[in-house]
Image (tube, coloured by chain):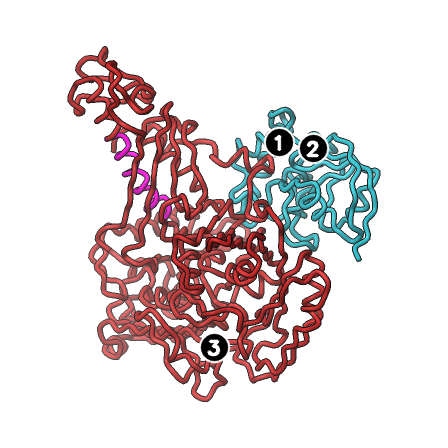
Chain colours: A cyan, B red
């Protein structure tokens, strides 16, 4: 009934071969098959950005990508940012600038921010606004999020 | 106030590293075990009799474990008015109301099962505007209103859609209107609104054959969920364990119980399984709670000098299909109905009206914003009619020392005029800036609707090395509770915040907390933590006094050592005291230190 295909990919630096259910979203695959629950489900229709991950370095809403599309690609999730217990400097900046409240949108925000910094090491306010326009924060930490990204860029 | 080391300082959030690394466990990250997925068959009509409900095809679908309908749930649920079936029985009252649930071994099978359920409705005329709905002869959303169990401070009107009529009379409004030079009469409206937390509502249940029910939930107030489930499923409280987690935004819609009960009969049928339900965005919008809509009608009498002599305030609330918290929001807005102003004569009628819209419930402000939208707009209208400065009208009528509220309470320590004047000065009130910029000033009073005995409690366990575990029942939904409470504990125990571990609630282990609502946690839970810390410190001094053979009053603690203020050489490390203290002779003095504290606000 459910068809599966074999896919090869890299997740947070590790090479993997897994079976993916045809029709399953990358979001469900990440959470339920890879058990990387840092990636959050908010709307499942690409509106909120809570499920943002990097595919070959580019930010995507993982709820709008099929798991089978991961084949041959490199996936980075929030769990892949800190290395050997050391926080990524953007993660540290989020803590230093109190750039979250409930924290549910935070992994997506950080992934979008990370993608921006890789593309533009010194972003302007407008660059940040544009890059994070697909990430919603209901608690309202936008100001602090922008400050965190700017501070991280300077380091 | 004594010098504070931790409270009032800027500290890093306690949940910081968890939240930036993806390690923070929200509820859906904790559903482990053999899973059963539950999906709902939802009503497609706002009001209708269920003529036919055939679940046989769904029941026979591969992967489907069971299909359940309203009759599988023993009782209704409701916080103040017990009016809601977990799953509709005989009729539906709003679009999105569950009419059946399908439990399956995969999400896909559950969704396919839902599609196979055959349901037919006989549509009934609906009520969508509460002003129409409260009229005699309007279609009834609940025919048996008078039979519903309720808390006796609420007044439903049997034979109508009015689930609560709150009445307030202060002074004599007719006399007040007679003294007025001008009567201003206006209508205002606030629509229903949704909270839209980024994390939708989610829950899971597990039943062990011994009769223990475990519920995981996005609940803001796990103790309330436990209380409601205990009643609805007729279970003793010690056999219900409600586990909350980090919450991805609450704003009120996760107070009370919403979807938890849906999965419990399935869990009981399949012991050992984790039966989960996750609302999608649409279900969250339709099926949880809404800010209640409000139609306000205000009639205000005012003298030429700007003094208000009387207020008649009629509020008609869109309570939605079931009341949950709604009746109490209507009550709170009713007794606060003169807002931040001292008005001698007030007549208020606040009605909660059933409609076929989504369920009304709490959201930031608990009715205060909706009610005061009318008051503050009316102040602007009065100023316009009198050609006065709206700030001036507010200052003339604003509460002062000794003023009385609508409910007749005398208020003290009021600085309303000072607040208004400060704001006016800071925003350059009345000054033009050479560019277009809208400016406004409004007052606000917040009268919480908490019972006078809304209480908190805390347990502090001191570890052998002097570090501590703080256990409380409050929830962390972004407000920073974990950090604030840790600061209070650190202050009370005189140890750094880094030496404190603090947990999110699990009703089997964390002590009672009334609810995490209404901006009360830092105050009430904070005070219970403060007293638990004092209790622990008392034990530390008592044990140390015995060990060091000096009076406890002479001892002090610097975070590492307990020593005598009279002779600093008489001292003991916290480890010596806290690690099941024994004398040098080897005789044991005391076991582990556990501080306890509980708090209920006084003079309420």
Q: Is residue B9 visible?
A: yes
Please say whether residue B129 is one of the residues in the magenta stretch: no
Q: Which mark is residue A90?
A: 1
The residue at which mark 2 appears reads as A117
Chain letter of the residue carrying label 1: A
Give the residue displayed 60% in from the left and 25% down from the top. Answer: A85
| Label 2 neighbour load within 10 Å: few <14, some 14-19, many 20+ | many
Res A123 → quadrant:
top right
How crowded pointer 3 is (Cα within 10 Å; few <14, some 14-19, many 20+) is rated as many
Closer mark to the observer between disc 2 and disc 1 = 1
Give the labeled residue for mark 3: B130
Marks 1 and 3, how far apart in space? 50 Å
> What range of the chain is rendered magenta?
B521-538
Give how far apart the Cα atoms at labels 3 and 2 are: 52 Å
Secondary structure mostly taken by the magenta-highlighted segment of the chain: helix
First in sequence: mark 2 or mark 1? Answer: 1
Q: Nearest to the eye among marks 3 and 2: give it.
A: 3
């Amino acid at each position: 009934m459910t068809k599966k295909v074999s896919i090869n990919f890299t997740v947070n630096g590790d090479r993997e071969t897994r079976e993916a259910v045809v029709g399953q979203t990358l979001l469900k695959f990440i959470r339920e098959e890879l058990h990387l629950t840092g990636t959050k489900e908010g709307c499942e229709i690409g509106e909120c950005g809570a499920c943002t991950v990097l595919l070959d370095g580019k930010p995507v809403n993982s709820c709008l990508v099929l798991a089978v599309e991961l084949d041959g690609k490199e996936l980075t999730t929030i769990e892949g940012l800190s290395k050997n217990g050391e926080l990524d400097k953007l993660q540290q900046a989020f803590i230093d600038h109190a750039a979250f409240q409930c924290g549910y949108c935070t992994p997506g925000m950080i992934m979008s921010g990370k993608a921006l910094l890789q593309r533009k090491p010194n972003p302007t306010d407008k660059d940040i606004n544009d890059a994070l326009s697909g990430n919603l924060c209901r608690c309202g930490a936008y100001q602090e999020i922008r400050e965190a990204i700017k501070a991280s860029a300077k380091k | 106030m004594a010098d504070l080391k931790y409270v009032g300082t800027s500290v890093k959030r306690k949940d910081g590293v968890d939240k930036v690394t993806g390690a923070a466990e929200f509820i859906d990250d904790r559903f482990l075990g053999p899973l059963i997925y539950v999906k709902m068959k939802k009503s497609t009509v706002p009001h209708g009799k269920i003529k036919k409900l055939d679940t046989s095809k769904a029941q026979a679908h591969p992967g489907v474990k069971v299909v359940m309908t309203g009759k599988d749930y023993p009782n209704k649920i409701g916080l103040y008015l017990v009016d809601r079936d977990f799953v509709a029985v005989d009729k539906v009252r709003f679009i999105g109301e569950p009419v059946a649930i399908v439990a399956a071994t995969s999400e896909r099978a559950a969704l396919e099962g839902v599609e196979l359920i055959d349901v037919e409705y006989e549509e009934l005329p609906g009520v969508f505007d509460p002003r129409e709905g409260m009229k005699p002869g309007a279609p009834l959303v609940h025919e048996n209103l008078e039979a519903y169990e309720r808390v006796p401070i609420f007044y439903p009107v049997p034979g109508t859609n009015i689930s609560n009529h709150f009445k307030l009379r202060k002074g004599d409004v007719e006399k007040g209107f007679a003294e007025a030079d001008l009567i201003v009469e206006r209508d205002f409206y606030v629509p229903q609104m949704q909270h839209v937390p980024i994390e939708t509502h989610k829950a899971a249940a597990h039943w062990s054959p011994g009769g223990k029910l475990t519920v995981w939930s996005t609940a803001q107030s796990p103790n309330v969920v436990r209380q409601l489930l205990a009643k609805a499923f007729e279970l003793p409280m010690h056999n219900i364990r409600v586990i909350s987690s980090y919450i991805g935004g609450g704003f009120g819609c996760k107070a009370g119980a919403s979807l938890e009960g849906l999965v419990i009969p399935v869990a009981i049928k399949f012991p050992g399984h984790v039966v989960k339900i996750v609302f999608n965005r649409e279900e969250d919008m339709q099926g949880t709670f809404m800010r209640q809509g409000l139609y306000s009608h205000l009639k205000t009498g005012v003298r030429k000098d700007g003094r208000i002599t009387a207020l008649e305030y009629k509020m008609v609330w869109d309570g939605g299909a079931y009341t949950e918290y709604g009746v109490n929001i209507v009550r709170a807005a009713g007794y606060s109905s003169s807002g931040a102003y001292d008005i001698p004569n007030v007549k208020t009628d606040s009605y909660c009206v059933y409609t076929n819209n989504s369920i009304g419930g709490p959201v930031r402000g608990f009715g205060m914003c909706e009610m005061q939208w009318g008051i503050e707009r009316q102040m602007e209208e009065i100023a316009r009619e009198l050609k006065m400065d709206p700030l001036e009208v507010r200052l003339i009528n604003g509460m002062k020392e000794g003023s009385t509220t609508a409910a007749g309470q005398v208020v003290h320590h009021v600085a309303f005029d000072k607040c208004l004047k400060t704001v006016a000065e800071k925003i350059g009130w009345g000054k033009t800036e050479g560019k277009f910029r809208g400016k406004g000033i409004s007052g606000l009073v917040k009268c919480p609707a908490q019972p006078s005995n809304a209480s908190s409690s805390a347990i502090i366990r001191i570890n052998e090395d002097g570090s501590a575990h703080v256990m409380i029942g409050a929830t962390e939904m972004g407000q920073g509770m974990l950090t604030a409470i840790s600061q209070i504990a650190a202050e009370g125990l005189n140890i750094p915040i880094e030496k404190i571990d603090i947990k999110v609630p699990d009703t089997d282990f964390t002590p009672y907390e009334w609810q995490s609502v209404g901006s009360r946690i830092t105050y009430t839970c904070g005070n219970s933590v403060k007293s638990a810390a004092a209790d622990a410190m008392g034990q530390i001094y008592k044990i140390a006094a015995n060990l060091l053979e000096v009076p406890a009053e002479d001892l002090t603690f610097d975070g590492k050592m307990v020593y005598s203020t009279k002779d600093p050489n008489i001292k003991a490390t916290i480890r010596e005291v806290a690690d099941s203290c024994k004398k040098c002779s080897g005789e044991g003095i005391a076991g582990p230190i556990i501080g306890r504290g509980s708090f209920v606000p006084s003079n309420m």
